[in-house]
Amino acid sequence: MKFAGVDLSEPRIMGVINVSPESFYKGSVRNDEEKLIETAVKMVKDGASFIDIGAKSTAPYLETQIPVEEEVKRAVWAVKAIRDHVDVPISIDTTNARVAEEALKAGADIVNDVTGLKGDPRMAEIAKDHGAPVIVCAHGEVRNLSDPVHTVMDLLKESLVIAEKYGIEEIAIDPAIGFLRPEWPPWYEWDSRVLANLNVLKTFGRPILVGVSRKSFIGAITGRKDPAERLAGSLSATAIAVFNGAHIIRTHDVRETLDTVKMAAFIKRFRP
Ligand SMILES: Nc1nc2c(c(=O)[nH]1)N=C(COP(=O)(O)OP(=O)(O)O)CN2
Ligand SMILES: Nc1ccc(C(=O)O)cc1
């Protein structure tokens, strides 16, 4: 299996860089060009196979609204800055079709839409026009609260229908860890149930991308309030995601995550 030209026979790492000061993990934020390039180059050197650029936080528990012009400006600046310094595909993490379009024109390769093509009605068309592979997150009303992973599957199927309608073929699916927050069960249990049953998503026959890095469910389970203290929790959740079939791990910590992924993938080979 491949995604954006990257061979997924071994699990791969997507390094996250945010150019959004409001992002929940301040250690992921770069707003200086030299530091931005240095971080991207180091991530690739450390083993990242993709770089994801976020220009607006999508944390469901933060005040994150900024004007779309500001998101476009940040995204284009970041993509242009790193494009000639890294030789891996760059994804643009946005729910806005204009941001996606401008970032793709600036040199990004992949659209990463946490609304799974359901937010901006022009998103699928923009991705198709640019021939860009798409990452779709499970997004929408949460139904069937007793069965999180099948709810995630239903939400992903809706995104695949939209993608199919526009003729987009290269799609990675993402269970949207941290995004789906029903009143019950508590989101940290929801996320844990999804990760424990992630193998079910294999039936889609598509690349599975998972982002657990420093997220709030880890804070809730470990008691670590500060995202800066959630590395160990993130690595543990990463190992489980890989053991249960994740192909791409989206992370703020490339070096540590790559070792974790290698261990989980190696041990997984001997599963009966
Ligand atoms: N496909 C995908 N995209 C994502 C995911 C994720 O799990 N999957 N998580 C995010 C949260 O991390 P980030 O550091 O970007 O936080 P922010 O939204 O506060 O910038 C943002 N984007
Ligand atoms: N965009 C997101 C950022 C953070 C979280 C989380 O901490 O659970 C979820 C989504």
Image (spheres, rainbow, N blue to C red):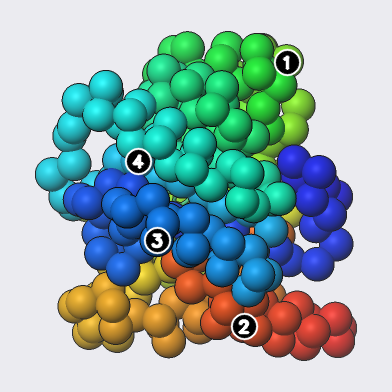
Q: Provide the residue designation for mark 4.
A: 55
Whether the residues at callouts 4 and 1 have beta carbons within 8 Å, the answer is no
Q: What amino acid type is highlighted by mark number 4?
A: Ala
Q: Nearer the viewer, mark 4 or mark 1?
A: 4
Whether the residues at callouts 2 and 4 have beta carbons within 8 Å, the answer is no
> Looking at the image, is mark 4 or mark 1 earlier in the sequence?
4
> Looking at the image, is mark 2 or mark 4 earlier in the sequence?
4
Q: Is residue 259 left or right of residue 8?
A: left
Q: In the image, what residue occupies the spot 85% across and 81% down?
A: 269
x then y, percent, for residue 159: 56, 28
> Callout 4: few (<14), some (14-19), or many (20+) C-alpha neighbours within 10 Å?
many
Q: What amino acid type is highlighted by mark number 3?
A: Lys
Q: Provide the residue designation for mark 3.
A: 35
x then y, percent, for residue 170: 74, 33
Cα distance in 3D space between marks 3 and 2: 26 Å
Q: Which mark is residue 260?
A: 2
> Callout 2: few (<14), some (14-19), or many (20+) C-alpha neighbours within 10 Å?
many
> Looking at the image, is mark 2 or mark 1 earlier in the sequence?
1
